[in-house]
Image (tube, rainbow, N blue to C red):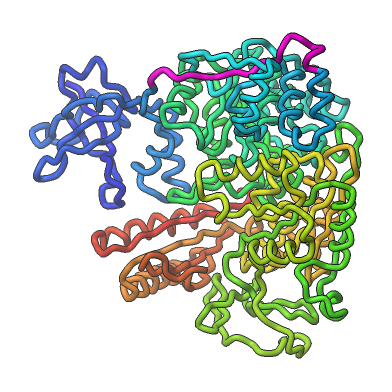
Amino acid sequence: MKYADVIVDISHENVDRPFEYIVPSELEASLRCGCQVVIPFGKGNKQIQGFVINIKEEPTFDVNRLKAIESILPGSRRIESHMIELAAYIRENYGSTMNKALKIVLPVRKKSSPIVEKYISCSPDRQKVEEALERYRSDKRMVARCRLLEEAAKEKVLPYNIVRDKLNISVQTIRSLEKEGLIRIDIMENLRDAFQIKEQLPYTIRLNPDQLGIADDIWERYQAQDLRPSLIRGITGSGKTEIYIELIDRMIRQGKQAIVLIPEIALTYQTVLRFYKKFGDRISVINSRLTAAQKHDQLEKARRHEVDIIIGPRSALFTPFDHLGIIIIDEEHESTYKNENAPRYHSREVAVKLAQMSGGIVVLGSATPSVESYYKAKNGIYQLYSLDKRAKGKGLPEVSIVDLRQELASGNRSIISRKLDELIRDRLERKEQIILFINRRAYQSFVSCRSCGAPVQCPHCDVSLKYHRNGKLICHYCGYEMPMVRVCPSCGSKYIGTFGAGTQKVEEEVNRLYPEAMTLRMDMDTTREKDGHEKILSAFANREADILVGTQMIVKGHDFPDVTLVGILAADISLYSGSYLSAERTFQLITQASGRAGRGARQGNVIIQTYSPENYAVQMGASQDYPQFYEHEMSYRKLLGYPPSMNMLGIFAASKDERLLQESMEQISRMVDQKIREGLNVIRIGPSAAPIARIQDQYRKILYIKAPDYADLTRIKDLMEEMAEQFPDKGLSLIYDFSLNAN
């Protein structure tokens, strides 16, 4: 007789432990670690699901008290043993139940029925194609047809869904070219890949000496079993992707597999095609637009060794490769690599753990690395590489800073500064495109002075206070609060108030100032309907609009060659967002925005409008000086003990019972204070109200704990989980959010 340890499918700390079950003789041959099973649970023997995490020959408890597993869940996929180990790592380091952690790594269960894929190929009649292109290029109404035909002539075969979703070409345009006999649409069934092209496209890129030097060094370290993660800091256009491709190619030649993580919004047609040209149908893609059945197919091909490379966002990290050699994390600074729900794991740390388990390596890349990653590189935890020149020798756009205090003093109260207005009119006259965007990461307004530019800050945490509708200014780190001020505490000016302009207000002002221009707005409101993003981006790419107004979604992963001007209308919104990360995010924002301008043949310009032109994030963002920004930022974080100079644990608590929430947070605070008195080297900050204190009748509070030693934070987390068992049914939820240093 065999016995199994099973994690029950109940996400509650009180049952977050294995339960022992008898393995029936009829299941012994098929039951494996990682199987999802049906088991009787509790006094009423309720039929629930669970995960087998261990199978053994000897029982731990009295056999007469043990129940038997009912069955293996039909249609379920087995979790590989190394994924169970990875789930245990996530559970231990990020605070959750084992059940929740297992569901993070659980492969998609739903199988797919046969699917149909379409492919577009160019007419072999080259003369007919060239004559059509000549007509289209002289007709402004034919921009979309021209773009599609040019791409089809260049690439020969294109996936239909890529043309629609990433190249932003409408169905009507595709059908029109098909009727003219300029393209052909082929239909194939039972294709499992997200992308499949019938012929190998040529990959002609050769690495320059700087790129080759980095690739060679990373490879030599891998061969010598130096498996430290590598961080490539390379300016936009410096050729980081080509290094990734070179390293993946070497891995595949050794029978290894690769995972490439890319932020969802940066999964563009151009990005995927660069990998496809090199590796053909040995790659597959996972993204949120695939159905559960389609995702299942991609993971099944990985399991069967039918693909060597998976490209996708955070979830692609859990692809069931058994010969994983390399994990690439492109744009590693992006916040989307951190899971928003419990467990709040970070893909970067989980990728490093997975690579260690697989004997592989992790390569991180960004023009603006996260301060945490750069800190690790500077301290030898990661190996640092730098690319300071663009691969094709093209220069960066020209960046200018506009002081909005001077605009106000001169009588200009418009959202658009005089400098930006001048350049917008110039670009409209030259028939070039413009992007105007406002960063809405800060969802509550801060208060600042229009005369001196100073924000109202917390005297204890050096972050801006956030304005609440009850007329109070509150710090969401320590809970400090004060009444709304009427004059500036720094200069005494009466020109002080909340700051925050929405995209709709910007669009109205743009339409008033430039009535002759066609304007599009892209934000949460205009993209709610299905394919909302694609429709707006397609219209802008096809020159159906001159100006695109939007939030952060318009400056990531999109390549518009006719955009020669980018205006950042409110850099201060991210600069004073009330977070210790605000300067870092602002610096990254400016760099990302700068990368949208001048990507074609013409020089680009970027205008940064701010009430704080002297701020180091603005100044160094304009000059693209990352090393100098890092040194300045680390001085600030060391002074105040923010990560990565120290570890920090955020404890987010929520309950519909406001009194229970308050009492629970006080109990947690007393426990932490007691451990401090006993010699535990931690610092408690708060508790305070969350940035949004109530959502759907759930009251919310935050408590922060800082510690030099990460183990002390996990100890606090473990003690809190024990405390949670004392009130299991009172409706209190706890989420743990770790920010780590290099240790």
| Residue 257 in view (yes/no) | no
In magenta segment, residue 448: no
**Span of residues in magenta:** 113-129
Query: Which part of the image, by quadrant, shows the N terminus?
Result: top left
| Residue 478 in view (yes/no) | yes
- The residue under the point 74% across, 56% down is 436
- The residue under the point 26% across, 47% down is 15
Q: Is residue 48 above or below residue 737?
A: above
- The residue under the point 23% across, 38% down is 19
Residue 672 as seen in the image, left or right of residue 477? left
Residue 633 as seen in the image, left or right of residue 503? right
Q: Quadrant of the rendered structure where residue 359 is?
A: top right
Residue 59 as seen in the image, left or right of residue 191? left
> Percent x, y for residue 278?
70, 18
> Percent x, y for residue 742?
64, 48
Foreground of the two, 203 or 37: 203
In magenta segment, residue 119: yes
Foreground of the two, 6 or 267: 267
Q: Is residue 616 above or below residue 90?
A: below
- The residue under the point 67% across, 79% down is 456
Q: Is residue 344 above or below residue 156?
A: below
> Percent x, y for residue 317?
53, 33
Foreground of the two, 419 or 480: 419
> Percent x, y for residue 595?
79, 45
